[in-house]
Amino acid sequence: MEISVLTASGESKGTLKVSDNAFGREFNEPLIHQVITAYLAGGRAGTRAHKNRSDVRGGGRKPWKQKGSGRARVGTIRSPLWRGGGKTFAARTADYTQKINKKMYRGALQSILSELVRQARMVVIDNLSLETPKTKELASKLAQLGVSKALIVTDQLDNNLVLAARNLPHVDVIGVNEIDPVRLVGFDKILISAAAVKQLEERFA
């Protein structure tokens, strides 16, 4: 299949031939949903922890005898009903990671990339670079392309692009090796260099 290539000013610069296996797969929504869910779950720290009645220091001795005092029976001063006691349903550290095979992850990214091409949300640019790290210059180029919210993907991370995009809301710059399903799905437009497309083709073909 062929993908249209534009210049940085938005003019047509021919087409780029790419593999159908990488950019022409069918949309597999259940697989994409599973991979994105697993990706987000893997980012959870799971480090929260509360102390239950066995974790709180003290309370080993029964405060008073079981019967005869006229007070309610109690076994420890570290009961959740007492001030300074443990928490009733204490949170515990947890591992939320889900197992995803490499083949599934690869297939999900191929499906996402293919759908981006079909929806014309992936815009291939011949050359994505800036001579100086100026936000105004990058904003001008995005305006020429008719884009306000975009993920910019380059074959090699350009420090000028990164610095220029820091002050633009809803604009992010990553290298082609940093792509992930969540960012690919979350942005309205994906601006990607032709060299980065070829790297993706080699990776997923």
Image (cartoon, rainbow, N blue to C red):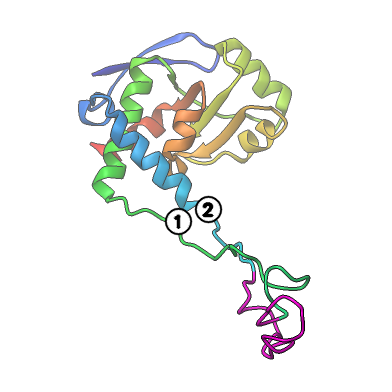
- Mark 1 or 2, nearer chain start: 2
Q: In the image, residue 34 lies at what x, y percent?
A: 34, 40
On screen, residue 73 versus residue 146, left or right, reads right
User: Looking at the rendering, which quadrant does residue 45 occupy?
Assistant: bottom right
Tell me, for residue 72, which label it has, or none.
Answer: none
Kindly indicate the quadrant of the structure image that contains residue 50. Answer: bottom right
Task: Identify the residue position indicated by label 1 in the image.
Answer: 96
Mark 1 crowd level (few <14, some 14–19, many ≥20, 10 Å Cα):
some
Decide: marks 1, 2 in contact (CB < 8 A)? yes
Q: Which residue is mark 2?
A: 44
Tell me where residue 86 appears, x and y as whole percent: 67, 71
Residue at 72 percent across and 75 percent down: it is: 72
Q: Is residue 154 visible?
A: no
Q: Is residue 189 magenta?
A: no
Q: Is residue 70 visible?
A: yes
Q: Which residues are magenta?
A: 51-76
Kind of residue sitting beneath label 2: Arg
* 75 drawn magenta: yes
